[in-house]
Image: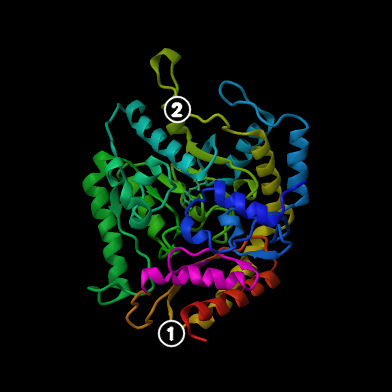
Amino acid sequence: MAADPLTLRGWDQDHVWHPFTPMLSYRMEDSPIIESAEGFHLIDVQGRRWLDGISSLWCNVHGHRVPEIDAAIRDQLDRVAHTTLLGLSSRPSIELARKLASLAPPGLTKVFYSDSGATAVEAALKIAWQYHRQKPLGPQSRTRFATLGNAYHGDTIGAVSLGHVPVFHEVYGPLLFSSIELPTPAGLRSPPGFYSRAAWLKHCFDEAERIIREQHTELAAVVVEPLVQGAAGILVHPRGYLRHLRRLTRQYDVPLIADEVAVGFGRTGTMFACEQEAVSPDILCLAKGLTGGYLPLAATLTTEPIYEAFLGEPHLGRTFFHGHTYTGNPLGCAAALASLERFQTANVLGNVRALSARLGERLSVLEGHPHVGEVRRAGIMAGIELVQDRETLAAFPTERRTGHLATLAARRRGVIVRPLGDVVVLMPAPAMPVELLDQLCDAVLESIDEATGSQ
Ligand SMILES: *Cc1c(COP(=O)(O)O)cnc(C)c1O
């Protein structure tokens, strides 16, 4: 017989260590234990229904239990669940690679699979590193990576080395390789010392140019989250910054790695964020939404010139000696193919445009809210920064956990959200109906008032 909810709660506390979760306070919170789902709702073991306001951590696209994706996985299960890509191939991995190459920005024709966003980034780093040692114009020892301030690229050690989010990354400092930090032109106000936002942005563009010019002979790659830095707190770049970085990396012959793990698959309004600035990176990292949020699968796409540097007689050792056991898992690839099919049949990008407009309208009421410092949004990714004082932007004391209080208040209203510090994040699934987005906004706006004490 299946364990009852109370027993499960006990076993959860006894045995499960939750990621990014302070476990002492988790134990007090009666967090839902999810048993099933229906569309955009999660259902817990007590039968309570929860609106999934964060796309099950930014990956769900079409809702849960989508008949076409379920059927594609079952159909693949009747053939084979897993077989290796080391020296062999499989039907869904081939079909998906071809599909991704046709959808990705021009020039990205080769697909290297792995299992998560972090592994997609790790593969990208090692590909860029090895490329410089094997490229036809003669080997170069390019040993450094440049990434943006507050960058987040995942939690494995290479990806953490690219990161610049102090609360996540600082403790590992001595374990990491250092990366060069490029400016992050985000924030709607100008920081102290700049007389206008325009002056601040110009400073960022100029600094990026100076750093890449001065360091390019050492740079193995520049790594960016295009348009939006998600885990940094939904930091939205001004128009043209991505394009600027592409122009500079071309001029100085430095590969550009675009990490679209969060922004890919419709979240900013286009299939890939790079499209909005007509940018083709040299390497593209995809994960979260790739399977519609069903299974752990990731892809690192590269151009022909990069791929070709790895060709040669086997004894020359130019091979990319890298891979994971479940690389290119057929169930994951089958789910991804069905998800991409649904983008077309269900006009998901059209829905994103409607959601994006509605989200903008709904969040505009926060302008002038005494405890909202900034509302940052691109497409259907939104971050609401809670502050003690709107004028000075003074933060709430960390120990107050104001963002977390807003999450708990949203739960009392049947909605699942998850903050980044005191930034309340809204990340509806690209296919969510507008009526549900409205429910999500109703609950979150009330929860912000409750958590900040401004009712
Ligand atoms: C989530 C995220 C990652 C890491 O993906 P995982 O699947 O959690 O390893 C990498 N880059 C970005 C931009 C992300 O948002």
Mark 1 and mark 2 in contact? Answer it, CB < 8 Å: no
Classify mark 1: helix, strand or loop. Answer: loop
Please say whether residue 400 is visible from this viewpoint: yes
Q: Which residues are magenta?
A: 397-425
Q: Position of residue 155 (x, y in %)?
A: 43, 46
Q: Residue at x 78, y 43 (%)?
A: 71
Q: Quadrant of residue 121?
A: top left
Confirm if mark 1 falls within 8 A of ligand 1: no
Q: Does residue 62 appear in this view?
A: no
Q: Which kind of residue does numbered mark 2 sit on?
A: Glu
For label 2, the SS is helix
Q: Quadrant of residue 175?
A: top left
- Please name the residue that numbered disc 1 is placed on: 370
Image quadrant assignment for residue 350: bottom right
For label 2, the residue is: 308
Q: Amino acid at mark 1?
A: Pro
| Residue at mark 1 to residue at mark 2: CA–CA distance | 56 Å
Determine crowd level at label 1: few under 14, some 14-19, many 20+ residues with C-alpha closer than 10 A: some
Disc sitting over residue 337 in the figure: none
